Image (tube, coloured by chain):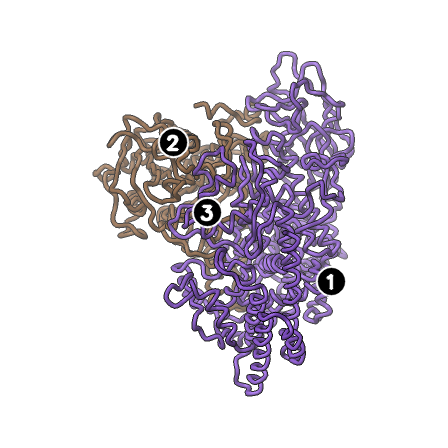
Amino acid sequence: MVGQTISHYKDHRELGEQIVGVVSFSEGERNAVFRWVARAMTTPTLWRWTAVALLLAAQVEVWAQDSKTAPAGPSPTLSQRQFLDRHCGTCHNKRLKTAGLNLVQVDLSRLGSQPERWEKVVRKLHTGVMPPPGAPRPSEADRRAMLTWLETSLDAAAAANLNPGRTETLRRLNRTEYQHAIRDLLALDIDASSLLPADESGHGFDNVILGDLSPTLLNRYISAAQKISRLAVGSTQSLQSDIIQNAPDLTQEGHLPGMPLGTRGGLSAPYTFPQDGEYDIQIFLARNFTGVVSGLREDRPHELLVLLDREPVKTFTIQKPADGDDTLLDKYLKVRVSGKAGPHNLAVTFVHEGSSLVNTLRQPPVSRYNDRRYPRTTPGINMISVTGPYAPRGPGDTPTRRRLFVCRPAGPNASQEEECARKILSTLMRRAYRRPVDESEVDRPMAFYRKGRAEGDFDAGIAMALSAVLANPEFLLRVESDSESVRASGVYRVSDLELASRLSFFLWSSIPDDELLDAAVQGKLSQPGEIEQQTRRMLADRRSSNLATNFAGQWLRLRNIDAITPSTSIFRDFDDNLRQAFRKETELFFDSVVREDRSVLTFIKSDYTFLNERLAKHYGIPHVYGSRFRRVPLTPESRRGGLLRQGSVLSVTSYATRTSPVLRGVFVLRNILGAPPPPPPPNVPTLDESTTAANLPMRERLAAHRSNAACASCHRTIDPAGFPLENFNAVGQWRDFEVDGHSVDASGTLPGAGAFQGIDGLEDSLLARPELFATTLTEQLMTFALGRGIEYYDAPAVRKIVRDAEKDNYRFSSLILGIVKSVPFQMRRAEGNGSSVLRTTAKNEQTLSRGRAWNF
Amino acid sequence: MEFLTKKAIPRRTLLKSAQAALALPLLDAMIPAATAWAATPAKPVPRLSFVFIPMGCDHSRWTPPGQESLDKLSPILTPLEPVKDQVTVITNMRLQNAYPGTHDTSNAAFLSAAPAKHTEGSDYYLGTTVDQIAAREIGRDQQLASLELSIDLNPLAGVCNNGYACVYQNCLSWSSPTTPLPSEAHPRVVFERMFGEGGDAAARRSSLNRRESLLDSFTGSIAKIKQRVGPSDRFRLDQYLESVRQVEREIERAEQAVTENKTPDLDRPVGVPAEFADHAKLMFDLQILAFQADITRIVTFQLTREQSNRTYPEIGVPDPHHPTSHHGNDPEKIAKIAKINAFHVSLFSEFLQRMKATPDGDGSLLDHTVILYGSGMGNPSLHDHENLPIVVAGGAATGLKGDRHIRYTEGTNLANLHLTLLDRVGIHMDSFMDSTGKVEGLFELTDVA
């Protein structure tokens, strides 16, 4: 059955492709249409109808173009009107106007004048959401033909009247962008989350809403500039203290990733010493909720190692005190280490004592952090504090200083120093402001330099000037402005420099590097060959791992993994080790598709993933040992492969105690298929999954969703998209039975598809219409690339990207290249053209009263 | 209370001060040399504090049985017993502008009483919140016009519901309909915002001086950017400059504070306590500190966010809050919601008790602070905004009576209460959003000097 469905779709897809291919050529080569029509006339009736329609369409367009007066795109014919009457008119007619939409007796010759309405129709038809389940469905051929006609008309109209959309003029750097920018500007790793408040997200991404600059934010940007400049130059005089904490639910019974072999548990973290000098490391042991150090025994000492850059600098031996009072036990776990300024790795860990079997009747759980249930059998580290520098010996030689100080003063007099200061600052400012900098612009930070120089030395001057650069709006804000010439002139190409920033903030969430900036300054970047070459270079660069951590972190909600806390009574093996492994698997997997330039369909189905022992055990995959992650080839028996089988995605779409077919269904529909369900209607209580007894199987518990008419309109689509994942529990483990012994019923369906079974069926169904997933991913990437929501006027560009990518088997780079070459990425709408502030406001007020108008 | 038996780990070993739940060995260099505590303002001043809880309550265990007094407290409100003479429980408040019922609007409307524009983009629009109106009037002379606190370090991304931008769910305070104020959950950052980064008086003065120069430079560059952009974006840049002015004011006030040397003798909080109760307590303590040092007079605190999936195993609720709140009248789930409600109230009660124990002028800090505690949602299973759980506390010096349970007419707008509270701290407005008048019976009739 499933196989038949696939071949069914495949056939039609191929036919559809022919149509799409031909019609998109209709500008030039109409003969092809006629050839295809001639062939199609020999096929069954409906195809003949389609052929006639196409023939007419093509012909009409010829006429229209001949008369040079016509609207763009082919004209409607009888069959389009019949299609709308038959399949849409029952609800979307003049009288009912369901969803505010009347599709009967509308003027089909002027589609292009109402793209917003018709793109919505296209989307519903494309994803198969409409006609709704239960209503008579058009034949696949009719549907394809209608879609093709609509898309061709809309694309032609859009091409004649370009609307690239308008990105915000002013956008501040968000937390991630700030952190990356500092890394690339100063070769300095900072933790921006301790310096800046969290960003708000819109349309699913945190780089959309960045126009605000509240006093709190401004304050924090200023503080960050001061702290970072001191750290970069190494001018910190006073002591500073930081703490590095382990997650409270980290199990430390075995070897942890990144630690030297032969060690157990502990904590390791990168840490930058601001100066050559001495630093106190104070260790705090993990204690249980009564305040007693966990895992200590009187009869057994533990060796505790302090490592600086993996070299042991101190060993402590700890043991439970004879009198049992361990209050002061870790007070003396303090060591003063001597280190050079710059980045280091600090680690505190235990010498592995050999296996200590726990005497228990049942199989011991893997997780051991929770003293109420499964106490540690050996001590663990809660946190360390680092305080220093004591006895500072100067700023030393750090990667940051090497990057910042591009010169040293040629001599001791003021003019020689100023000459070098100017050189340092202009180099820095070009990178920080992402553009060439006038000599006169350097004057402002030079004033800061002089002030700092007067109070201290040359370095103090540079530190102060650096803080002025980092606190400058030219660094903190991304500004895209209409030049005088384009203002009020419609749409325009963004400048090469703006394009360079768009590119680097898309791929790296950071500032352009020198090579990209040089290309932009030379005016080369707007050339198609150059932008492709630069894009490929940047994708190959390590910094593009940003797409896995930052883009995918939001698209797949990996960011929320830290917030999931599955119930410890039900999922007793869940701990932070597993949580981090979930994240790592998905990041490595995503990154492998980027690095190896695989088809994005790999995200749906793959024969490999990335595992370490902990995760492999969790998944029940044998022969993977050790804490290190490695690529693991998969067999069908492993039941893994593809994003939808990964613990990360499965757990962020679950509740702490159980799975949620609703959350998973919405995720599949919205983030994978691109057919998000509409929001619940006003005043209908949010749907409740627990109105019936909890001992029923999940499907029956959710039955109310589909029997109650108010709920059913959405949940008959949502729930069946989540049910196929029911074989995975709330922490992503395979199960054949629900908690209470009912066997799992994983049958489900997707809009526009037939019924299928389980994850295999879901994946096959998604792969049968690969253009839908490719479209969704393109839209998600484009939202992230542009920093704005995808609107109806972007649909033609998205369609072009997906069509072009299809020819390349949806390789990851084909999506990325399609986006960077697209109209919305390369162009911008000038202010006052089609979306003045006033009009936008008016439109939005309308939206408010009607509910969401454009619901992707 | 059994909830409160747990302790943050280092407290046992390290802390002399009960003020901070997580701190490190004191760094001598960080603590100002003189630690004279000259915080108390010469004359007690009115202050406002708003504490937000998400996802409504179990009314059957929330509403006090008494008709007028708090002779008998309800199970959820029992922790308020020690301070009930300064507590008024209010029944039957509603937020009609929070409809259609969502988590986003519950948070957004709580202090604004305004409808949130339905958008996921940067064109969000709400209303100025009651705390920010107060900040403009009675907060403007303080170092910080207002202080926004929260407890969730990482706002959830990508899952704000029903097409509303996450900003509605994350931000309680809005200084204008288009300016949501980010809140701070990290104790150290709050502390540094209040008292600077430490050092002796000269170092702190010099640090403030540098911040001023950086702001000047910022302003200068904004002027240049202004020439490049169109009219609507110029307006936005003007808003940035308004932020600059506000930060400048903060710095000026802080400079005065340096000379007056009223930095507290208190362990500098360093990390974020792992346990919810410890973290909440620390944030409440910072609030007390801010009032005590008169750094600000207006504080908002989002004790937990809407849609929070926080679990509370420490009180026997290992289930996540949000899905449990969709209780569908399952008695077991309702009981769990009640436990969470009571846990939050117990933390609030501790805060009130510490406020009461802190002297201020002729009375206590509690006497001089009007505190609103509550949720923008009523019954979480229905997502309605009727009969919101609301408590007004403190404010004896402003005439707040206490030990009362007031039942207003069903569907009384919460904006009426906001209007009344503003009035009591000296801000007289004719109306606030959908207010229909002030509420009665909350304050003594006698005017307070």
Image quadrant containing the C terminus of chain B: top left
Q: Residue at x 67, y 78 (%)?
A: A35
Image quadrant containing the N terminus of chain B: top left
The amino acid type of the residue labelled 3 equals: Arg
Q: Taking B408 as reference, is A709 above or below it?
A: below
Relative placement, left or right, of B50 versus A148 is left
Q: Taking B247 as reference, is A88 above or below it?
A: below
In x, y percent, where is residue B81?
34, 26
Relative placement, left or right, of A240 versus B333 is right
Name the image quarter holding residue A502.
bottom right
* Chain given the colour purple: A
Q: Mark 3 sits on what residue?
A: A706
In x, y percent, where is residue B71?
27, 26
* Residue nearest the viewer, comparing A44 with A726: A44
* Residue nearest the viewer, comparing A160 with B262: A160
Chain B: its colour in the image is brown
Q: Pointer 1 indicates a residue of which chain? A: A
Q: How far, Cα to Cα, is label 2 from label 1?
A: 60 Å
Q: Pointer 2 indicates a residue of which chain? A: B
Q: Mark 1 sits on what residue?
A: A515
Res B9 label: none
